[in-house]
Image (cartoon, rainbow, N blue to C red):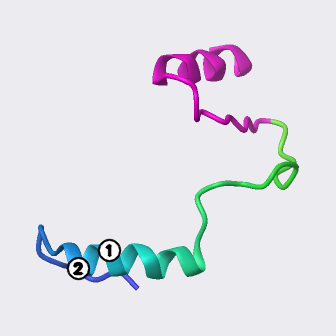
Amino acid sequence: MFQAVAKGDLAWSEQDLLNSMKYYRLNSNPGEITHELYLRINNTNKSPEQAARLIQEYFDL
């Protein structure tokens, strides 16, 4: 599915994004992943620093 494309080919990039959304998703559903070392963060209203702090605290880093 990967295809080399020239930088700035916005039409191709847009179509590639739309096509990939048919097959892939970037977010897990609540309760979908049951691994012990997993943290799901809704960072909609969080700064990168706040999200990083949550990760550090959760994983004791």
Residue 56 is tagged as none
Q: Position of residue 5 (x, y in %)?
A: 18, 78
Residue occupying the far front of the picture: 45
Q: Which residue is mark 1?
A: 14
Residue visible at 56% across and 24% down in the picture: 46
Q: Which residue is at 65% across, 54% downward? A: 27
Coordinates of residue 52 in the picture (x, y in percent): 54, 21
With 45 as the anchor, is 49 left or right in this view? left
Seen in the picture, residue 29 relative to 53 is either above or below; the reply is below
Residue 16 in percent (x, y) is at 36, 79
Q: Quadrant of residue 55?
A: top right
Give the residue pinned by disc 2. Answer: 11
Front position in the image: 48 or 39: 48
User: Across the whole image, how many numbered discs are drawn on residues?
Assistant: 2
**Label 2 secondary element:** helix
Badge 1, how many Cα within 10 Å: few under 14, some, many 20+?
few
The residue type indicated by label 1 comes to Glu
Magenta residues?
37-61
What kind of residue is marked 2?
Ala
Q: Position of residue 37 (x, y in %)?
A: 77, 35
Quarter of the figure with the C terminus: top right
45 is within the stretch colored magenta? yes
Q: Quadrant of residue 59?
A: top right
Which residue is nearer to you in this view: 34 or 9? 9
Q: Dot 1: what SS? A: helix
Point 28% across, 83% down: residue:
3
Contact flag, marks 2 and 1 (Cβ < 8 Å): yes
Q: Is residue 53 left or right of residue 8?
A: right
Task: Examine the rendered structure and indicate whether residue 7 appears above or below residue 37.
Answer: below
The residue located at (61%, 65%) in the rendering is: 25
Q: Which quadrant of the view contains residue 1?
A: bottom left
